Amino acid sequence: MKRGCLDNLFFSALLLIVFGGSTYFWFTYFVKGRSLPTPNLIGRSVSDARRIAQDLGVELQVDEERRRNSDKVPVGHVVWQNRNPGATSFIKRGSTVRVELSAGPLVLRVPDFAGVTPGTGMLRLGQQNLKLANLSYIQTDGTGILAADPPKDTVVAPQSPVSLLVATPPPPVQYVMPDLIDRPLDTVRLALESRGLNVATVKYEAYPGIADGIIIRQYPLRGAPVSTRDPISVVVSRGEETGGFAPVAGPEVSVPEAATATQ
């Protein structure tokens, strides 16, 4: 019994050795024997890369839609391949190697900032790998960025400083607020609006003894500075709603002094 068990064990070991050796042999012959080290196509022209691929029995696929910037690989030469080259990377005959071509060095140009806000301009600088040098302002009727230094489309190096000139609206004309009390709203409104001033808020209050439409309070007060950007508020009289009340027309008033410009 013991001799039979030993014979069986020996036979099993022999089969395992024969099977393992056969597997390794056929794997080496059919798989590894048909595999080759992946070629290094970086820096090659398309024609050279195709010739190398044909010699190895592989297909070269050139991506015509995508290009990569490179300071080292000339324009139109292979700059990237989808398989790592080298003796430790194998490729089978009949497989495909996909490559992308070089677009040459990255060329930076100063973008067009005309009319954009300073915030948008600085954002564009960052997107173009440029930086802000100086931000200057000038009072003019224009809007946004007026000019850049260097000017637009200038070829520059990465992180080059760019100065921007931004338009700011001129300050509004300043007036001295006139006394509007006891004057008719309609007349005052016309006089103020002719100078670009804005009666923004009108409120009405019942005020016995004063005809309808007469200003009884104002803001800004008399003598205060006021400009075309400042809203003017007035409170106007309104007669009590009684059947026998008849509004009396206010005096006609000329208001040449209603808003006197100050220098």
Image: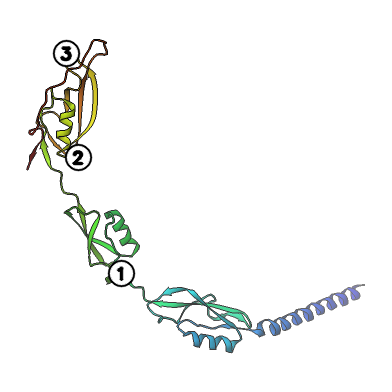
Q: Residue at x 15, y 29 (%)?
A: 187
Report crowding for label 1: few under 14, some 14 to 19, many 20 or more residues within 10 A (C-alpha).
Answer: some
Q: Which residue is mark 2?
A: 229
The three-letter code of the residue at mark 3 reads Gly
The quadrant of the picture occupied by the C terminus is top left
Q: Which residue is mark 3?
A: 209
Mark sitting on residue 76: none
Query: Residue beneath label 1, please?
Result: 109
Q: Nearer the viewer, residue 262 or 47?
A: 262
* Disc 1 + disc 2, Cβ < 8 Å: no
Q: Is residue 159 left or right of residue 30?
A: left
Choose top left, top right, bottom left or bottom right for residue 92.
bottom right
Tell me which label, 2 or 3, sits earlier in the chain: 3
Where is the N terminus found, in terms of image quarters? bottom right
Residue 152: quadrant of the picture: bottom left
Q: Amino acid at mark 1?
A: Arg
The spot of residue 116 in percent (x, y) is: 29, 56
Amino acid bearing label 2: Arg
Relative height, residue 225 to residue 99 (above, below)? above
- The kind of secondary structure element at disc 3 is loop
Q: Helix or strand or loop: what does disc 2 sit on?
A: loop
Answer left or right for 123 relative to 262. right
